[in-house]
Image (tube, rainbow, N blue to C red):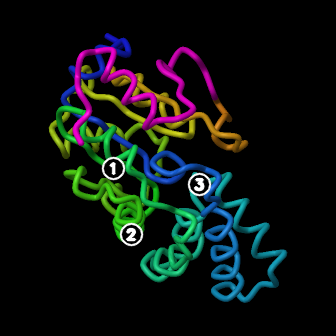
């Protein structure tokens, strides 16, 4: 059963994507990551930058992540790649007191579910000032390098953390990543952005709530539902 907006505060678990979900897509961290992926591939495969970029996007299209393509095609150790591509300037990500307030209203467990690694997730959450709200991080390493939206990873998430999908909420900026969550019975929240990849695969059948401002929306729902935000 899909939880209505006010009913979201009966949820037992909240599962949040990280990048472009907990912070605005306008921070554009992926532009930095994109360049660092290209440069890593150019060095690793001895390619010029243009060819490295072509390979990067080809693997992303075929395998869901560039990393997975490099592992499958070239037996690459993922550790150095993840360290390199996430060594970025996080200054565009600012402390967000409103998000802190919104997370404080939510009952139940809070988890991060990301195609990045936990090191990147920790650094971003520290910048936002919200790290203390999250119990677990289910990252690309924990998922055996299989990315969202592969359905088996959502089953692994549920099994690993003992989640009841009917009492869980998933929040994402990439619409297609919500489809497997909805298929399991989770209530889904899509954080709308202007990015092309965020809207690809959008279908109202598996997007239950759409928001432009996640923190503001959660605080508003809490007030309408009779839950006072803390702080």
Q: Where does the image place residue 107, in percent across and percent down from the top left?
A: 19, 32
Q: Residue beneath label 3, please? A: 63
- Count residues near mark 3 (Cα–Cα under 10 Å), then give few for <14, some for 14-19, many for 20+: some
Q: Residue beneath label 2, please? A: 123
The residue segment tinted magenta is 202-231
Depth check: give the residue in front, 3 or 223. Answer: 223
Q: Where does the image place residue 140, in percent across and percent down from the top left?
A: 40, 59
Magenta stretch: includes residue 213: yes
| Residue at the spot 42% in from the left edge and 78% down from the top edge | 79
Q: Residue beneath label 1, please? A: 112
How far apart are labels 1 and 2 at the CA level?
13 Å
- Count residues near mark 1 (Cα–Cα under 10 Å), then give few for <14, some for 14-19, many for 20+: many
| Mark in front: 2 vs 3 | 2
Mark nearer the N terminus (1 vs 3): 3
| Residue at the spot 66% in from the left edge and 34% down from the top edge | 199
* Quadrant hosting residue 226: top left
| Mark in front: 1 vs 2 | 2
């Amino acid at each position: 059963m899909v939880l209505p907006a006010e009913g979201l505060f009966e949820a037992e678990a909240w599962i949040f994507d990280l990048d472009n979900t907990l912070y605005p897509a306008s921070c554009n961290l992926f532009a930095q990551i994109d360049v660092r992926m290209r440069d890593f591939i150019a060095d690793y495969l001895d390619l010029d930058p243009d060819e490295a970029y072509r390979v990067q996007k080809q693997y992303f299209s075929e395998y869901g992540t560039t990393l997975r393509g490099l592992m499958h095609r070239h037996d690459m150790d993922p550790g150095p790649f993840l360290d390199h591509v996430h060594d970025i300037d996080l200054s565009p990500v600012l402390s967000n007191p409103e998000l802190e307030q919104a997370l404080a209203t939510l009952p139940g467990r809070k988890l991060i579910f990301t195609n990045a690694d936990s090191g990147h997730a920790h650094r971003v959450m520290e910048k936002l000032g919200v790290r203390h709200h999250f119990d677990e991080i289910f990252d690309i390493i924990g998922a055996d390098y299989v990315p969202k939206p592969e359905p088996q990873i959502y089953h692994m998430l549920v099994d690993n953390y003992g989640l009841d999908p009917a009492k869980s909420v998933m929040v994402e900026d990439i619409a297609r990543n919500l489809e497997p969550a909805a298929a399991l019975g989770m209530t889904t929240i899509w954080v709308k952005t202007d990015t092309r990849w965020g809207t690809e695969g959008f279908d109202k059948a598996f997007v239950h709530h759409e928001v432009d401002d996640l923190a503001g929306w959660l605080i508003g729902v809490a007030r309408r539902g009779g839950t006072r935000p803390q702080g």
